[in-house]
Image (cartoon, rainbow, N blue to C red):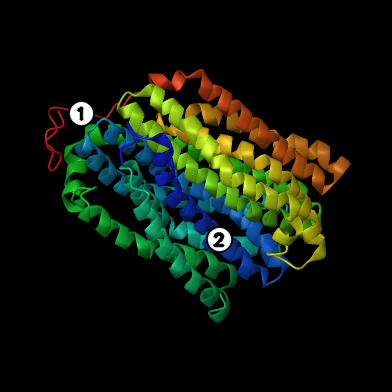
Amino acid sequence: MLTTSGNLNSQIIKLAWPVVLQNLGRSLAIAVLDSFWIGKLGPEYLAAVTVGSFLSWGVFALAEMVPIGTNSIVSQAIGAKETDSARYIGTLNLFNAVLLGLIIAAIVYPFLPILYQFTNIDATKSALANSYVLPILLLLPCTILFETGSAIFRGNGNTKTPFSLLIVVYAIKVVLTPLFIFSLDLKLTGASLATMIAYGTTFLIELFLLKRNKLISSLKKKSVEIVRNKLYNVKVTFQSIKIGLPLSLEGLAFSFIYIFVTRYVADFGTVGLAALGIGHRSEAIPYQVGEAFAITASIIVGQNIGAQNLIRAEKGAWRVLLISWIPMTLYSFILFFFPEQVAGIFTTDSGVIAAAKIYNMIAAFGVFFAMCEAIFEGAFAGAGNSLPPLAIYLPLTALRIPLCAILAPIYGITGIWIAIFSTSISKGIFIALWFKLGRWKKRKFVLAKKPVDDAPFELGDVR
């Protein structure tokens, strides 16, 4: 779907609804599903998976580097009517996805013991968290390949196919998770292993569809071109990383900062850790909805940047924000007026429910600003300028650490919740103001043409 002309509202809805359902499903079938089954093992396991989730978020954030860059550059290529360039870029980044997964695993693995020490959890919980994280590291290329393939579809304006493919991921995950956790007695290892197997298996289907729809080139021939067209491939890889790295660093910073925040939460024992985990599961729905609308904003801004339609690009981003607030109003109502019932989905422990209740009530107001943060982050990425979100995100998220140190002794666990959401609201406001300045409008599609001395194999004449 091209978004460079036509009715914006209908285009936003057509692009967004499959991604919203896809991301909601990701929360329900993966994050929430893991918490549901792991919660039956006991509070110790639920607390451990909370820590493991923070670490895995950092890993997945780094893994998003290539998919984010792919989505942005392919969108710009499609907007500029450079379909051959879009095909070339997508194919190359599938190779980059595998390489990135191996590099991340090799770098992160030696640091895991140190990271567990930072969280201030005991040896038993560290071992449990480690059993959850290891399969994610070892099989990381599975998820990066799947997300990169999805980014290729989305950059071409197709959000329905990634949604259909993720349904397959969910179906496999739903079957394998209880089987691995209980029947095979793999416990936390089984939960994450089921996730990675589901992604890897579904990517094979995705690869077939990408080739059938001629959205990528021959992988065999492309492997030869990596050697022949070094300069252009380096340029594509550099642009992908340039766009994706700042947003990946945001996710990594989130994970790292939460390791320190978790130290303060750990002072309140298993109840505090479990409540924080439940709070994040409750937020998973608005977070995934925000990410879905962020992808929509990235596609619209990217395609219109490629077509040099700057007024429509800006208008589209703000329109995406307004439409995203419609479902968030309903969810905010649920979180505020039924906070105990939402927390009770994950545990029957009264102490944990009491702590999570307050988190949910505060989150009911924060979700609107979280939409601002996510959507304008996606808009900046679509324009190929992802540094402003990082410049806002890093200092304000890091501010949670001193705020926790100040507010926790005064207000208890509620003080930590206040620290989290005061910074979240601030980020949403500042990124919206920065986007309004309009400096991102100077961006343009820089990969429209291959060097003359490169011999394309399936690119046609892109010179």
The foreground one among 185 and 365 is 365
Drawn side of residue 41 relative to residue 64, left or right: right
Which residue is tagged 1? 449
Q: Nearer the viewer, mark 2 or mark 1?
A: 2
Mark toward the start of the polypeptide (2 vs 1): 2
Amino acid carrying label 2: it is Leu
Q: Residue at x 36, y 36 (%)?
A: 240
Drawn side of residue 141 relative to residue 174, left or right: left
Amino acid carrying label 1: it is Lys
The foreground one among 255 and 339 is 339
Q: Residue 232 placed where, x, y %?
A: 23, 33
Of all residues shown, which one is farthest toward the right?
Answer: 410
- Would you identify the image quadrant in which residue 367 lies? top right
Of helix, strand and loop, which one carries label 2? Answer: helix
Q: Quadrant of the C terminus?
A: top left
Up/down of 358 relative to 243, above or below: below
Mark seen at residue 28: 2
- Would you identify the image quadrant in which residue 244 lies? top left
Q: CA distance from mark 2 to mark 1?
A: 42 Å
Q: Are marks 2 and 1 in contact (CB under 8 Å)?
A: no
